[in-house]
Amino acid sequence: MRAIVMCTTCRYSAGEKAGPDGRTGGETLIAHMSEALQARGMASVTLQTQACLWNCKRHCSVVLRDDERFTYFTGDHEPSRAQADAILDWFQAHGGSETGEVPFRLWPDRMRGHFIARIPPVKP
């Protein structure tokens, strides 16, 4: 199973818990991701939410989960549509890889510097 797991409680910025509309950064990024998935006709991608991913120093946090390939834990995402699009671009490249390893040259610029951990798939 592949999924994008997004933190609902991440701060909007280093100095603000919530943005101008009262939503957290996580809630804002989730809304942008939902819009991006819909705009691309990618309703089959599972979008999961989780309160606090324990990465508060590097908000907004997103896990790019995969049962058969490497899973990636990311952070420091700007709660914007442009960032949601970059996350989704990378996730699509990840899905096209047999192992989940995406060559650095194929990474969207907005994804560089956001990776925290690479987690191998669980093998039976």
Image: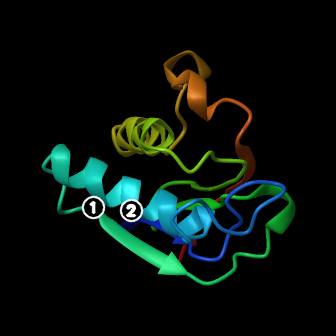
3 or 59, nearer to the observer: 59
Q: Which residue is rendered at x = 56% and y = 71% of the image?
A: 22
Select label 2 or label 1 by which is in front: 2
Residue 19 image position (x, y, % from top left):
61, 61
Q: Is residue 37 above or below residue 66?
A: above
Please say if the residues under marks 2 and 1 sit with CB atoms less than 8 Å apart: no
42 or 38, nearer to the observer: 38
Q: Which residue is rendered at x = 46% and y = 37% of the image?
A: 90
**What is the three-letter code of the residue carrying label 1?**
Val
Task: Classify mark 2: residues with Cα within 10 Å, few (<14), some (14-19) or many (20+).
Answer: some
Residue 68 image position (x, y, % from top left):
44, 61
| Residue closest to the far left | 41
The reply to whether residue 78 is in sight is yes
Residue 76 image position (x, y, % from top left):
72, 48
Task: Classify mark 1: residues with Cα within 10 Å, few (<14), some (14-19) or many (20+).
Answer: some
**Secondary structure state at the residue bearing disc 2:** helix
Q: Quadrant of residue 91?
A: top left
Q: Is residue 13 left or right of residue 84?
A: right
The reply to whether residue 65 is in sight is no
Quote the CA–CA distance across marks 2 and 1.
Answer: 15 Å
Q: Is residue 54 left or right of residue 84?
A: right
Which one is earlier in the sequence, the residue at label 2 or at label 1? Answer: 2
Q: Which residue is rendered at x = 58% and y = 29% of the image?
A: 110
Q: Which residue is mark 1?
A: 45
**Secondary structure state at the residue bearing disc 1:** loop
Residue 49 image position (x, y, % from top left):
48, 77
Q: Which residue is mark 2?
A: 31
Q: Which residue is rendered at x = 29% and y = 48% of the image?
A: 36
| Residue closest to the far bottom | 51
**What is the three-letter code of the residue carrying label 2?**
Ala
